[in-house]
Each structure stands twice: as structure tokens, then as C-alpha cells.
Image (cartoon, rainbow, N blue to C red):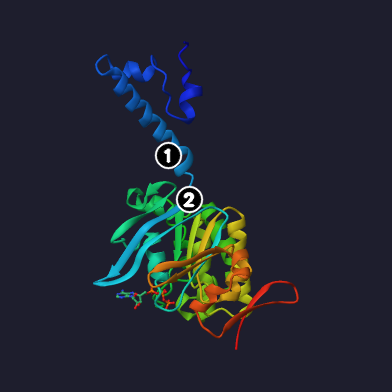
Amino acid sequence: MEPEPESQGCAERPCLCGNDRFARRAGTENTARSAAALRFRAWHRRFRLNHVSSRLLEVKSVSFSYGSRSILSEISFHADEGEFVALLGINGSGKSTLLDVISGFRTPASGEVKLRGRAQPQWRRRELAQQVSHLPQSIHADLPFTAEQLVGMGRYPHTDRWFESGEDHRHIRAAMERTSCWTHRHRAFRSLSGGERQRVLVAACLAQDAVVMLLDEPSTFLDIEQQLHCFNILRDEAQAGKLCIAATHDLNLALTYCTRLIVLADGAVAYDLSTADAHQDKSWLRLFSKRLDMATTPTGAPWVWYQ
Ligand SMILES: Nc1ncnc2c1ncn2[C@@H]1O[C@H](COP(=O)(O)OP(=O)(O)OP(=O)(O)O)[C@@H](O)[C@H]1O
């Protein structure tokens, strides 16, 4: 029997043929067993690269406690490019904590977060910041920077030590124009209104140009037009190939713009469903209030209302 060419038999599964490079590497003693083990390891590595590593974000059995108080318990889900995930849950359900864990700001007590198949602690910080941006729920508003300087901080993972490049400036300007805050660029960040500041912070995340965007209540402080604009931008980012995960309390924004809803309750994922399924099955609404119901607008869109 002809030895099976490596490029055919071994590429997709463990190749059981003898007399190949694995047998030669294994030497003459215990040849069959050693060669099989080498073959399996090579196949497993290729399988991981081809299948597992292509997963953009994996959250695997993540648990987290503040002191003795358990907040997240065995949270698992995965998400990929092109998704816009709404992270939902009542106050204190752990949304911000989960985003902190995914971003690497907090370390889980157990479980792990993987990015492109690689466990988060194995990423160098700068590399990780090129992949993941994070808009926290609040930041100190006393920062002595202009709006443009603050957005420029989003470029730190990409710039060399001291200088911003022309490309950095293009990203900064584009991000500030998208969130309608370019006109405020020379103003002190601390002098801006709450909504103006929020637009600057969202612009900093956009300027970072990371494939995973984590946003904790991105529409906070925004007027209605700006809320729609903000979620529209995030949907565009997802459609352009990013993964956006936004914690929000606005169920209608989530239903209108997001592709998927993950609802946290009692430290666990209570619901993980596509927005289309969320239109059909209203049971998830009960976690928020018994007074909620869902109707359909004249344009056919779902609409959550309360009585
Ligand atoms: N630094 C901390 N130390 C101790 N407990 C904390 C800390 N931060 C948050 N918690 C507690 O952990 C729980 C989860 O908080 P978290 O901010 O993650 O919830 P959330 O779902 O984002 O809430 P919200 O909708 O109110 O923003 C809350 O009960 C909160 O009081």
C-alpha cells in the first residue's frame, strides 16, 4: 500500500497510515504508538487552529466574586465578528462586572476568556488593547485633557511611544465626526455636558479600532436622536465585521439594533437568544418587570411598552 500523502490524509483527521514522517520522528522503539501520538498531536493542533481559534470570543465557565459575594457563576457563551450583542439584566445583575472580566480589567475566580482561541492572560497588554476596546460605565470627569486628546488615547495601542501618526489623526477625526463631537475637539473634556462627554468616550473606543468593542451603557446621557445615532454606529461597526457587546437598559434600542440578547439573572445567563427569537418569545421580559409587554409598531418592528 502506498503511504498516504501528508497533505491529504493527515490534514483533516489523524492519519492512521504507517511508514510516514511521524513514524520516522518517533524512532525505532515503540514506533507505532509514538507515531500515532505524534500524528494525533499534529492533527489536534491543526484542528484547533482551523476550528477553535476562528472563534473570536469565548467566555468559558467564568465565575467572579467581590469578596465572599458571588456575582457571576459559570457564565459561558461565545460570539463572533458581525454580532451586535445586547447585554441585559436588572441593576446589579453583573453586566459591568462581566464586561470588566472580558476586557481583562478583572480576573475571574475560575473559568477563562479566550480571544481568537488564545486565553486572555497569554495576550500581551498592548496586543490585547489592539483587539479589545472598553467603554466603562463611568470615568473620572476631572481629566485635564481636551476632547481630542482624550480620543487620541484610544490610539495608544497603535502608536509608537511618543508620536501619533497621520493615520492616528485620521482615525481620531473620523471617530469624532461620526459621534458628532469634532466641533468640541479643543474644549476641555471636563467642561463638556454629560452627553457631549459620552460622545467623546464612544469616539475614543471607535478610534481604537479594536475588533471587539465592549460598551457599558453607551447611550447614557444621550438625547434620543444621539441614542439612535450611537446604536446605529455600533450596528454599522458590527456589520463591518466587528463584535460589539453593549450593556444597556434600553430594551427597545436592543431589539431595534442588536442581533442577539444575552440576559443575566442571579449570576447566570438566563436567556441567550437572537433578536428575532426575542420577538416571538416574550418570557424574557418577565425578568425586568411584570408590567412590560411587547407590541408591533406600524412598521412591523417590535416595541416594548409598559402599563
Ligand atoms: N467594586 C465592587 N466591590 C464590591 N461589590 C461590587 C463592586 N462593584 C460592583 N459590585 C456589586 O456587584 C454587583 C454587580 O454589579 P455590576 O455593576 O456588575 O452590575 P450591573 O448589572 O452592571 O448593574 P447596573 O445595571 O446597576 O449598572 C452589584 O450588586 C454591585 O453592588
Mark 2–mark 1 Cα distance, whole angstroms, equals: 13 Å
In the picture provided, is 180 more to the left or to the right than 88? right
Q: Which residue, given by chain and number where applicable, does mark 2 sit on?
A: 56
Q: Which kind of residue does numbered mark 1 sit on?
A: Arg
Please indicate, yes or no, whether residue 267 appears anywhere in the rendered image: yes
User: Sequence order check: which comes first, mark 2 or mark 1?
Assistant: 1
- Residue 266: image x %, image y %? 38, 73
Front residue of 164 and 116: 116
Most distant residue in the right direction? 298
Residue 37 vs 210, above or below: the answer is above
Horizontal side, residue 124 vs residue 279: left or right: left
Q: Residue at x 44, y 36 (%)?
A: 47
Which mark, by number, is residue 48? 1
> Quarter-wise, where is residue 35 in the image?
top left
Q: Is residue 178 visible?
A: no
Does 35 appear above or below 93? above
State the SS at label 1. helix
Q: Residue at x 41, y 22 (%)?
A: 16
Residue at the location (62% across, 56% down)? 239
**Mark 1 packing: few (<14 Cα in 10 Å), some, or many (20+)?**
few
Mark 2 vs 1: CB contact within 8 A: no
Q: Which label number is shown at residue 233?
A: none
**Amino acid beneath label 2:** Leu
Q: Residue furthest bottom?
A: 307
Taking the spot 34% from the left edge, 17% from the top edge, the residue there is: 23
- Residue 282 position, x and y percent, is 58, 73
Choose between 14 and 56: the one closer to the eye: 14
- The answer to which image quadrant residue 44 occupies is top left
Label 2: state its secondary structure.
loop
- Residue 197 place in picture, x, y as percent: 50, 75
